[in-house]
Structures are given as structure tokens and as C-alpha cells.
Image: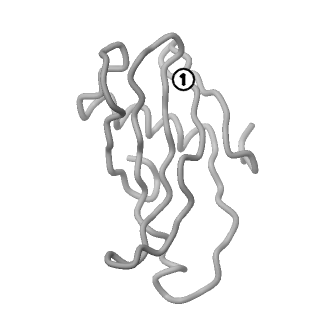
Amino acid sequence: MSKSQSNRGTVEVDGTIYDWHLQREPHQADDEGWKGMTIALLQRDAKRAAWVQFPPPKRLLKGLPRGRLQLDDATISRCVRAATAAGWEPMSRGKPVVFTVDAEGN
């Protein structure tokens, strides 16, 4: 699956399987302007999710219409690696941890 039109999927990173789904599409907040999409990551059989927030697409900031979101395995894998490097512990308990990444998921 190189390009995904789906809003959910599974990816394997370093021998561990993670499920992901689109938590929130890019939207305009009344007080903050445009906010980027958010995806939720959950390691299989783990308790704590990570929410990864992307910056708003440049096309929205320029006033252009929304385009179809493109999420592929490589982007999701980079998100998993960025979240774990930033301190996400999937086996711990608690609310989802929120991380911010760049447009490529790093």
C-alpha cells in the first residue's frame, strides 16, 4: 500500500505492529486559524495511544480548496518513530499523548 485513500490502516515498524486512523481532518478553528490533521496511533495490545498533529497544509493557508489527504506507510512509520523518540510509551496507561510533527511526519 504505497498511497492510501483510506482513513485507517496498519503499519509495521521495527517488528512491532501499529494501528492508525485519521482522528481529525484539517479544519479552521475560530480562534486559532487553520489546524492540521491529526492521526491516532496505537501499538497492538498496548494501552496508550499517541495523537500526531500535522501542520495545516500550505494550500489551506493560501485560501485554496481542500485536497484529498494522502497518508502512506512511510509517513505513518515516520510518525511512529517521531512519537517514540519524543517519549511515547505505548505500554503505559493514561490519556493519549499529543505530538506535533512536520508535513513529512518527522
Looking at the image, which residue is at 74% across and 45% down? Answer: 6
Q: Position of residue 22 (x, y in %)?
A: 59, 46
Q: Is residue 12 above or below residue 78?
A: above
User: Given the current orientation, which residue lies at the most extreme bottom position?
Assistant: 63
- Quadrant assignment, res 17: top right
- Residue density around tag 1, few if under 14, some if 14–19, many if 20 or more, within 10 Å: some
Q: Is residue 72 above or below residue 46?
A: below
Q: Is residue 12 left or right of residue 3?
A: left
Q: What's the colour scheme?
A: one colour
Q: Position of residue 16 (x, y in %)?
A: 51, 14
Identify which residue, 104 or 9, lies in the foreground: 9
Q: Is residue 71 above or below residue 57?
A: above
Looking at the image, which residue is at 54% across and 47% down? Answer: 23
Identify which residue, 32 or 88, lies in the foreground: 32
Q: Is residue 39 above or below residue 45?
A: below
**Mark 1: which amino acid?**
Tyr
Quarter the N terminus occupies:
top right
Q: Is residue 72 left or right of residue 106?
A: right
Residue where numbered disc 1 is placed: 18
Counting labels gives: 1
Q: Could you tell me which secondary element the residue under label 1 belongs to?
A: strand
Identify which residue, 79 or 14, lies in the foreground: 79
User: Given the current orientation, which residue lies at the most extreme left position?
Assistant: 87
- Quadrant assignment, res 79: top left
Looking at the image, which residue is at 48% across and 51% down? Answer: 38
Q: Is residue 53 left or right of residue 93?
A: right
Q: Position of residue 69 (x, y in %)?
A: 65, 59
- Quadrant assignment, res 98: top left
